[in-house]
Each structure stands twice: as C-alpha cells, then as structure tokens.
Amino acid sequence: MKNIILTSILLLFFLQFGISQSEPRIKEYYNSIKYSNVDTFLTYEKKYYDYDVFGNLISEIRKYYNDAGTLTNWDGTFYEYTSNHLPKKESIKRYNPDVDLWITEEWIEYKYDLKNCLVEEIHIANIGGLTKRISYEVNDKCQWLFNYVETPDWWNDTLLVQISYEERDYYYDVSGDSAYLDRWNFHFFDEKENLIEYHYIFTQTQHTGHYESRTTIEYDQFNNPTMRKSYRRYSEYDDWDLWFTFNFYNEYDNNGFLIGKREELISSSSIANPNYAHTFQYKNSCEGIHEIINIENTEYGTKRIEEFIYEGINDCLSLEKINLEIEVYPNPSTGIFNITSPIFKTGNTEILVYSIDGKALLQKTEISRSSSSSIDLSLMQNGLYILQLRNGDHFVKGKIVIAK
C-alpha cells in the first residue's frame, strides 16, 4: 500500500509543482546514500518504468540493495487499463526468485459509470481483505463533487472516514456509534487553477493536542512555482511560526520552455531542523529530463541523492528548417516495416496507418528522439496502406504494401 501511496504523492507533486508544458514520462529512478565514514554513494533502490504503445504506464519495477550492493528483494506495481485507456487495476507484486514468479500482495480496482466517470476505488490486500473503499459522486463532466472514504483501522478497531466536498477534506474516526472529527484540510486556487495555499488541521477531540500547518505558493508568468512557505502552530490562538521556505529558480529558453530548475530549502525558524539541507536541480534537454534531489543531514552525517530520469520533451529541432522525408524498408513487407524520417528527432511523433478508404488501423506514439522506428502489421491482410507521421502541425505521408 505504501508504494501506491508514494506513487500517488509523486503524481500529485508533478501536477502541482512540475513543469507546465506537458507531462514527461519517467524512465528510471535511483536512490543513493553516503555516510560520513565512506567516500562513495551507495545506491540502495532502483526503479524502472515501462509503457504501452498508447503511452500508458504498465509497470514500475523496484529493486532494493543492501550495504554491500547486493540485490536483496524486488517488487513492482503493474497497471491494467480499460478499452478507453482508463485505469482498471493496480497490483502490487513481490518477486520470488526461488520460483521465478510475481506474487500479488495487494491491488486497487477502479469502477466507472456509463459515462466513464470514476465512481469507486476498492483497495484489497491478499492478507486482511478490504483495506479501503472510496466512493465518488461526480457531475456530468466527471468532476468530483463529493467522495467518501472508508478505511478500517485494524489496530484500534475503528473506521477512518474521509468526506470531501469542493476543496475541503474531512476525516472522521468512527468507533461503534460514535464519530469525531480527527483532522481536515482545505485548498485555495487562483484564476489559473494554480494551488496557491493549503491548510492542514489536526485535532484530537478525545484527547489533548492541536496542530495546524499553512503553506503558500507563488508562481511566475509560466505557472511554475517560485517560492513555497510553510507555517505551523500548536494552538488555534497562537501566532503562525515560519517553518521553512522553498525557493525555486527557473530557467527558460527563448520560447518560454522550462529547461532548468533549482530548488533550495531554507531553514528559517527555531522549530525547523538546522541540520537539514535540501536542494533540487532540474535539467531539460533533447536527450531527456534529469532531476537530482540532494538531502544532507549533518546531525547524522548522511547525504542522500535521488535521481529521476525522464524522456525528453523539449522541441530541440525546428521542423520548418528540415526536409521532411520518409523512408520505409522493406517495402513491400510481410508485416514488419522499419521507418526512417527526421521528424522522429523532435520526439512525441505519432505513427498512423490507414486503409486506402481512410479508415484508421494503427496509432502509435514514438517518444524517443532517434531517427527511426518500426511497426508490426503482420496481422493485417495483403494490400496497399497509407502511412503518416505527424508531429503537431507537421506531417509526412508514404505508401506501404503488405505481401505475404
């Protein structure tokens, strides 16, 4: 379950604080640590991501290593989709090398109404059964109006219920016939739908204690964050103490495309950890996107590096300045065609195949920036077909023949 939650948090992070042009696809992730008594970093976690021809994430494989660099265990999350490319099921599986099998430990099932609106999530574990059920009430545009979350608390024999309405989330602890408000949070957005402020309030009404945090976010003209400040207090009557500040330094090309970003965490309060330092660097190029998060804790003498490697999405090649030719071989073919064209160098190029009467038979997106790709039409009948490569407003066409 924690891996599913972590994936969701990462997705929310990039939706809220990531680049604004389009969503890049992550390829690899590395988590490394260095102790004060050693000279090199040790990579103890690696992740690898795979996608289908439609760009849907189908697997996230995680491998874990010990201090000697030996692979100790690995698991993964596997994704299934409906015919409309909507999430259908997420499965957490652990790999057993003794029998060379992936063993399912827990999974999420997604349910939709006739309009393909998400109306229910069911979280199930192999041991323990149901762990969470989320019901959604939506409008005609599939926008959430209300959701209801049930989470059994096996330790305290209670049920945690989340009720969300608009920008507010309320959490209740339910035990027997009694229920009390445990915590809640709410969000504020600007006219561009950027998250500009959110509050989190935790209160133990059956006990003593109160905690609140408030975070504000500022953005530049390209809707990327420039500063994030967090405050907290331990009583609703206290003044807010500045907890920490994130500064974001964004770098753009002449077209306003984000090509670099640096993030720094500044401890500016006595309640913040003065021994903790955090920096984040982001670099976007034709070869791909590389993110590095450096976390240093001088109290424990550790340094940690997290690396995220994405496929490139920056348009590094001007299509107006090149001759858009296409070369297909072999042609005729029994079904396998190799395609070469300069248009592939821009990335995110669509490959489409039509029958001679204009019926679409195949659609594939080539993400990489190599100059060639391939398609498999072995299941199609003999005949003449139209091949089209398209990137934005630019396209090139050719004819292919299947002869078996």
Image (spheres, rainbow, N blue to C red):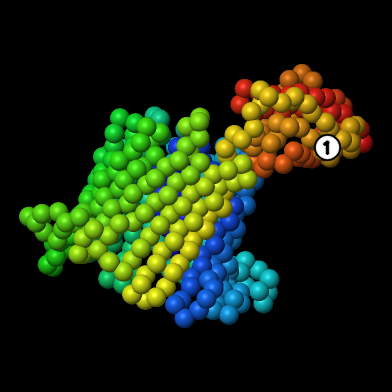
Residue at the (30%, 57%) spot, across then down: 266
Residue at the (61%, 41%) spot, across then down: 286
Q: Position of residue 399 (x, y in %)?
A: 83, 25
Residue 204 position by quadrant: bottom left
Q: Can residue 135 be seen here?
A: no
Q: Position of residue 323 (x, y in %)?
A: 75, 24
Q: Position of residue 71 (x, y in %)?
A: 61, 74
Q: Can residue 396 be seen here?
A: yes
Residue 383 position by quadrant: top right
Residue at the (52%, 47%) spot, across then down: 283
Q: Position of residue 17 (x, y in %)?
A: 39, 45
Compared to residue 38, the image places residue 347 above or below, namely above
Compared to residue 401, the image places residue 231 above or below, namely below
Amino acid identity at mark 1: Phe
Residue picked out by circle 1: 337
Residue 347 position by quadrant: top right
Q: Residue furthest right?
A: 404
Q: Is residue 223 left or right of residue 42?
A: left
Compared to residue 39, the image places residue 374 above or below, namely above
